[in-house]
Amino acid sequence: MARMRQEQGFTLIEMIGVLAVIAILVALLLPKVFEIMAESKANALVAAIRTYETSIVDYYSDISSLLPLNATGVPTAETTGDSATAITLPARLTLDASDALNTGAGSWVRFKGPYLSKFVTTVPPGLGTAVYMPVTSPVSYATATTASNIAWDLNNDGNSDIPSGANVVYVYFTGISDSDWDKVDAIIDPGMGTSTATRVLRGRVKYDAATDEMMIYLNHG
């Protein structure tokens, strides 16, 4: 009986030891797992950006405008970029040419959608809480870029490079953390400044830490 109790006690000690080792391994590996997940989400977002760019080029090729078409087929300014609104650019990009919203009037005769398979404002690709695709006029050319103005410094000189008379298409994401922005910016804008203060304002990716919003330039014309 004494020997049996000793063997049972030793087995319990072994189990405690195994659990302790597992706990240590989990503590060491869990941050790595989260880092890999974050990198994967950032890559998914960047892949979506590439798809958006292609769809916009195709749409422009057919319509000769970046603006979404209204019911009469006239390109019309619309700045919310919310896919739930039918006249927004993302809603038009995902519209099938055979849909009843295609009235056949004006520029609709050249519409060959869908140009984009999916864009849902409430379901951003990978990161954030929402995604929007506005198309609007930029601030004046050579205006200093800020975290929130409609301006992008594409040549790394601190000022906007979008022509004043153009329309610019961009996406902005809400609910983006500093680390989320950092990962996306490193992929899309490598070499755009060395300090955070410079990087958040230069290149195609801008970030406003005060609102957790990230704005990414797509095209202008």
Image: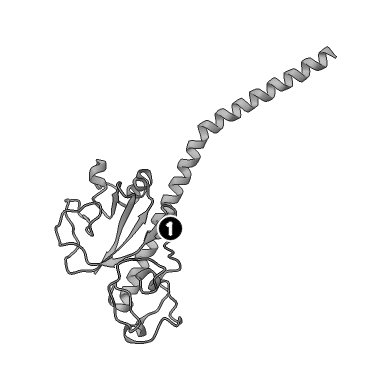
**Image-based side of 9 in relation to 63, left or right:** right
Q: Quadrant of residue 110?
A: bottom left
- Residue 173 rendering spot, x and y as whole percentages: 36, 56
The total of numbered circles placed on residues is 1
Identified by mark 1, the residue type is: Pro
Where is mark 1, residue-wise? 124
- Residue 60 rendering spot, x and y as whole percentages: 31, 74
Crowd around label 1: few <14 · some 14–19 · many ≥20 (10 Å): some
Q: Residue furthest right?
A: 1
Q: Residue furthest bottom?
A: 105
Q: Quadrant of residue 139?
A: bottom left
Q: At 82% from the left edge and 17% from the top edge, which residue is drawn?
A: 4
- Residue 125 rendering spot, x and y as whole percentages: 44, 57
Q: At 82% from the left edge and 14% from the top edge, which residue is drawn?
A: 3
**Image-based side of 189 in relation to 104, left or right:** left
Q: Quadrant of residue 106?
A: bottom left
Q: At 21% from the left edge and 52% from the top edge, which residue is drawn?
A: 146
Decide which of 33, 103 is in the foreground and name it.
Answer: 103
